[in-house]
Image (cartoon, grey):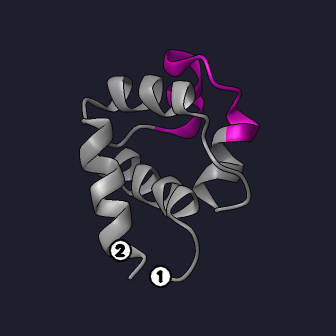
Amino acid sequence: MNGGLARAVGVVVATIADEVLMTQSELSRRADVPQPQISRAFRGMRVFTLDELDRVCQVLGVDVAAVVHDADLARR
């Protein structure tokens, strides 16, 4: 994957959400992040703020540091 780390994070989060069968709408509601922002982050068109990423990771039950680590590996 090419691109910056912040954009790669969105792709990793999208993959995790897919694996746990959570829709963007449900993630949006539970993390209090507007669905269009989640959609754009999943497609690499915007980056999550740190607060958004923290809330999204909490909802998905994953560690923020692990997501960033996986994104770093994926973008290489």
Q: What is the span of residues highlighted in magenta in the rendered image?
A: 23-37
Q: Residue at x 32, y 49 (%)?
A: 67
Q: Residue at x 71, y 27 (%)?
A: 34
User: Is residue 11 shown above or below 18?
Assistant: below
In the image, 10: left or right of 33? left
Which residue is label 1 attached to? 1
Which residue is label 2 attached to? 74
Neighbour tally class for label 2: few under 14, some 14-19, many 20 plus, Cα within 10 Å: some
User: Is residue 25 shown above or below 44?
Assistant: above
On the image, the x and y values in percent for residue 27 come to 50, 29
Answer with the quarter of the image where residue 29 lies. Answer: top right
Q: Amino acid at mark 1?
A: Met
On the image, the x and y values in percent for residue 28 come to 59, 26
On the image, the x and y values in percent for residue 18 come to 38, 51
Q: Residue at x 47, y 55 (%)?
A: 9
In the image, 53: left or right of 73? right
In the image, 34: left or right of 42? right
Q: Residue at x 69, y 33 (%)?
A: 35
In the image, 1: left or right of 44? left
Mark 1 falls on what kind of element? loop
Q: Is residue 27 magenta?
A: yes
Q: Amino acid at mark 2?
A: Ala
Magenta part mainly helix, strand or loop?
A: helix
Q: Is residue 10 magenta?
A: no
The reply to whether dot 2 and dot 1 touch (C-beta < 8 Å) is: yes
User: Is residue 29 shown above or below 25?
Assistant: above
On the image, the x and y values in percent for residue 38 come to 63, 41
Mark 2 falls on what kind of element? helix
Answer with the quarter of the image where residue 64 lies. Answer: top left
Q: Quadrant of the C terminus?
A: bottom left
The Cα atoms of the two marked residues, 2 and 1, are separated by 6 Å
